[in-house]
Amino acid sequence: MDYTAFAEDWEAAWNAHDLDRILAHYSADVVFRSQKAMRLTGRGEIHGRAALRDYWAKALAQQPDLSFIVVDVLRGHGMVVSLYRNQRDVLAAETLRFGPDGLVVEASACHKN
């Protein structure tokens, strides 16, 4: 898998605020973890692409200027860590584990602030 190409498409999808394109990277039964999810959902772990769509739709509605710049891509066995900065210059890391079909089955987001 070309993780750099994946990160570039992931970045472009987010910057376009295109939920269908963003979610095309994730399996139907994905598990997503993020401290920031607590603010909108009351929980830090989200199960399934449909629930992830709901969460990200709310997040994008609250941040119409949201944008990301991937600053580095760290490769692992069946996984990648994308380091990126948002529109406020906050550093974040997204750890993505892939299934055999190349879709993300587990994702964890960590933020500097």
Image: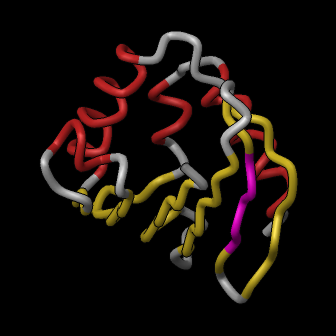
Q: Can you give x and y, in whole percent of width and height, for residue 40 in the image?
A: 21, 36
What is the chief secondary structure element of the magenta stretch? strand
Looking at the image, the residue that sits furthest to the front is 113
Q: Residue at x 53, y 36 (%)?
A: 22
Query: Which residue is at a point 55% across and 74% down the rendered structure image?
Result: 97
**In this view, 73 is above or below 16:** below
Q: Is residue 95 left or right of residue 8?
A: left
Residue ID at (54%, 20%): 17
Q: Quadrant of the N terminus?
A: bottom right
Residue 22 vs 26, above or below: the answer is above
Query: In the visual, does 10 lie left or right of 43?
Result: right
**45 in magenta:** no
Seen as rendered, the residue at the extreme bottom is 77
Snapshot quadrant of residue 100: bottom right
Q: Is residue 83 magenta?
A: yes
Residue at the image point whose x is 74% and y is 57% from the top: 83
Seen from the viewer's position, the closer of residues 78 and 101 is 78
User: Where is residue 49 shown, x and y percent of the image?
Assistant: 30, 48
Q: Position of residue 11 (x, y in %)?
A: 71, 37
Q: Colour scheme in the image?
A: secondary structure
Q: Relative to 88, say whether 80 is above or below.
A: below
- Which residues are the magenta region? 80-84
Q: Position of residue 2 (x, y in %)?
A: 84, 63
Is 62 in front, or is 99?
62
91 over 47 or under it: above or below? above
For the residue pair 21 and 75, the one nearer the viewer reads as 75
Determine which quarter of the picture holds residue 59: top left
Q: How many marks?
A: 0
